[in-house]
Image (spheres, coloured by chain):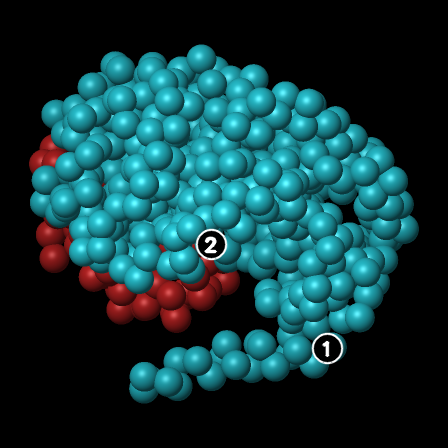
Amino acid sequence: MTLLSKFDSLAADRAALLSTGFDPFGIPIEQIYSPTEALIKGRRILLAGTNNYLGLTFAPECIQAVHEAIDREGTGTTGSRMANGSFAGHRALEQELADFYECRSAIVFTTGYQANLAMISGLARAGEDTLLIDADCHASIYDGCRLSGADVIRFRHNNVADLDKRLRRLGDRAAGALIIVEGIYSMLGDRAPLADFVDLKNTYGSYLLVDEAHSLGVLGHYGRGLVEETDLINEVDFIVGTFSKSLGSTGGYCASNHPELDLLRYTSRPFVFTASPPPTVVASTRAALPLLREGVVLRKKLWENARRLYQHLDGLGYKLGPEPSPVIAVLLESREQARALWEGLFEHGIYVNLIFAPATPGNESLVRCSVSAVHTGEQIDHICQAFAELRELASAS
Amino acid sequence: MTVKYDEILDRLGLHLQQVAGTKLEFDEDTNLIEGLGLDSYKVLDLMLEVEDEFDISVPMNLLTDVHTVRDLAQLIEQLKPAQ
């Protein structure tokens, strides 16, 4: 196999995918109208697959902050913080995130993917450390583990007994190992049994990192995620998250009480060697954070929408993720079935996510919806109606 | 090959049959991906079963050198504490 010949089979798969005129994995959005509507292939499409949980991408406060930032500070930072310095906005956002979690400090990263890459590879070292990760963790966590070179042990998804068993097998190495879980899992929308994992990490003297990418803004009175909902903020060693979902911009962060967090600024290669977030992104995120924190009404509406759609799909007999959440995954036995349902929904004017095995838990393919607080009742009705009309189509494929 | 290795191979074989299907034949030289039709995620799920079967931890990073059934059996032999 040569450098490029390995792409032959992927090229064939892609050609088959494009033969119907759709690329579900790179849908061209011609114009975005709002957090829930866009022009796609000349049609006004309802967006139900964008993880825009609070609908803040068009918040006037954020847009105004971006306008002011670009006039004041220009379009970019043109390099890393180590080389080009930290703008006032970078430092302010880090302090605001630390205050938000009532933690000692926080670090901002340029993307959410990079936050996991930087934290895990910065904390763990080859030949010294052990990482224990939930089997359903996001690719950024797997990639961070790989970059670290440390020993990586995978445990069965959300299975406390399984993690216990694997910690026991480590013997003395369990003390000091880093356990990594997520607040809400991106594929099936279920949440980690965090209190049980905290008990285990305390029993073995391990550390715990929780990725709140999909739970920030979604769980907890102030939207701080599963750590707040379970009242375990001070029990978790490292809280990682992203700006690209509930905060409506792009970027990532880690908050922690460990003073060593600030030393990662000098040792974590994904932080040191990446251009820092531009002023516009920082400004938008800073404007969105108080909206998220005070967004009690938005969270209430988000959960009303999520429960309503989940219960409707459940009632129709679709196989779903294990619990209601703003991430609602419909599990299908084959790629063809998933593709047919995805196309059917698009024909009904609805965009959701199509995810094929093996990039999914188990061996099933997914049609994944994400619900927003700013979806109207009529929009949720429309999604429910489309799934009802497509029920037989999905079964027969 | 020692008896211990053969025992590992026998016990490993039962799990490989489960993930690859009972009709598929394989030997020590069979490649896990190409020979058994497993993708990388199925190999990781297989490893959860294998770890429990032998009560060992197999770090994912060690799997980069595992290509065949023999490679896997030898890795288990190496990681399995002497009984």
In this orientation, which residue lies closer to the viewer: A272 or A371?
A272
Image quadrant holding the C terminus of chain A, namely: bottom right
Chain letter tied to cyan: A
Furthest-front residue in view?
A72
x 61%, y 25%: residue: A295
Q: Quadrant of the N terminus of chain A?
A: bottom left
Q: Depth check: give the residue in front, A100 or A166.
A: A100
Instruction: Give left or right: position of A279 versus A14.
Output: left
Q: Chain of mark 1?
A: A
Instruction: Give me the disc on residue A71.
Output: 2
Disc 1: CA contacts within 10 A as few (<14), some (14-19) or many (>=20): few
Residue topped by disc 1: A21
Instruction: Tell me the residue at 46%/54% (across/down).
Output: A70
Q: Examine the rendering and report whether any part of residue A331 can be seen.
A: no
Tell which tag, 2 or 1, sits nearer the viewer.
Answer: 2
Residue drawn at 37 percent across, 85 percent down = A4
Q: Is residue B20 left or right of residue A179?
A: right
Residue A148, horizontal then vertical, whole percent: 20, 49
**What letter labels the chain drawn in red?**
B
Provide residue A165's location: percent of width, then percent of height.
30, 26
Q: Residue at x 39, y 52 (%)?
A: A73
